[in-house]
Image (tube, helix red, strand yellow):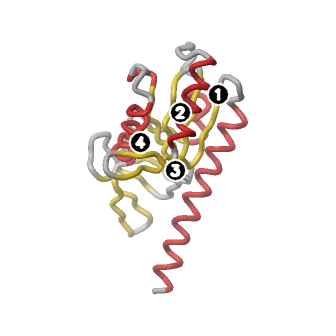
């Protein structure tokens, strides 16, 4: 039982570490008023809720970001239901984070139904020491490539007024 508790705490701690690293990169590299960052946001979804690590609302689009703080080797397919993490002789199947983030994107799209679908982007960021042993799936980046990836979106598609409206709608709808 103690091992289970320590293991759960360790996993939770690692997730928080990864989220803190992503938050630091985003707040350092992407400044207001063109960018607004919402962290750890829980939104209504279907018959329940969904928890989103980060939503970066910008004049370039809305980025729904899932953070994974993994180590070891990652074997992944964009459409696979599960990905495999290998650390020495230990193999762990984990749900595909792209599918997890798709649920988050659907929740955001539901609230921001006035935005064209192509202005809401899904992104999974790997912050740990993990190395992909398969091709890195589309929509997944390592933390050290996050800023470069987001800077590729260089066309303004959302006005500053609309950006503030989006942030307000997300803030008013989120659960505490």
Quadrant hosting residue 136: top left
Q: Residue furthest bottom?
A: 1
**Quadrant location, the N terminus:** bottom left
Of badges 4 and 3, the one in the foreground is 3
Q: Is residue 65 above or below residue 58?
A: below
N-term-proximal mark, 2 vs 4? 4
N-term-proximal mark, 1 vs 2? 1
Residue contact at pointers 1 and 2, CB within 8 angstroms? no
Q: Which residue is mark 2?
A: 169
Of badges 3 and 1, the one in the foreground is 3
Real-space CA distance between mark 2 and mark 4, rounded to the nearest whole angstrom: 16 Å
Describe residue 69's horizontal placement relative to residue 121 as left or right: right
Real-space CA distance between mark 3 and mark 2, rounded to the nearest whole angstrom: 12 Å
Secondary structure of the residue carrying numbered label 4:
helix
Residue 112: image x %, image y %?
Answer: 44, 28
Q: Which residue is mark 3?
A: 175
Q: Residues within 10 Å of mark 2 (few under 14, many from 20)?
A: few
Secondary structure of the residue carrying numbered label 1:
strand
Describe residue 71's horizontal placement relative to residue 96 as left or right: right
Secondary structure of the residue carrying numbered label 2:
helix
Real-space CA distance between mark 3 and mark 1, rounded to the nearest whole angstrom: 22 Å
User: Tag on residue 35?
Assistant: 1
Residue 77: image x %, image y %?
Answer: 31, 43
Instruction: Give me the residue at 27% from left, 46% from top.
Output: 80
Residue 156: image x %, image y %?
Answer: 57, 13
Q: Which residue is mark 4?
A: 104
Real-space CA distance between mark 1 and mark 2, rounded to the nearest whole angstrom: 16 Å
Of badges 1 and 2, the one in the foreground is 2
Quadrant hosting residue 9: bottom right
């Amino acid at each position: 039982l103690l091992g289970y508790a320590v293991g759960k705490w360790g996993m939770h701690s690692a997730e928080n570490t990864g989220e803190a690293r992503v938050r630091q990169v985003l707040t350092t590299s992407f400044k207001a008023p063109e960018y607004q960052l919402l962290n750890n946001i829980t939104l209504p979804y279907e018959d329940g809720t969904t928890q989103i690590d980060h939503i970066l609302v910008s004049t370039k689009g809305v980025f729904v970001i899932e953070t994974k703080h993994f180590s070891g080797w990652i074997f992944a397919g964009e459409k696979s239901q599960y990905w495999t993490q290998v650390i020495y002789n230990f193999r762990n199947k984990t749900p595909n984070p792209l599918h997890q983030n798709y649920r988050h994107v659907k929740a955001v799209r539901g609230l921001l139904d006035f935005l064209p679908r192509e202005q809401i982007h899904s992104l999974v960021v790997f912050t740990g020491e993990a190395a992909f042993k398969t091709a890195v799936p589309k929509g997944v980046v390592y933390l050290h490539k996050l800023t470069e990836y987001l800077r590729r979106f260089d066309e303004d598609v959302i006005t500053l007024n609309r950006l503030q409206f989006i942030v307000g709608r997300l803030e008013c709808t989120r659960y505490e």
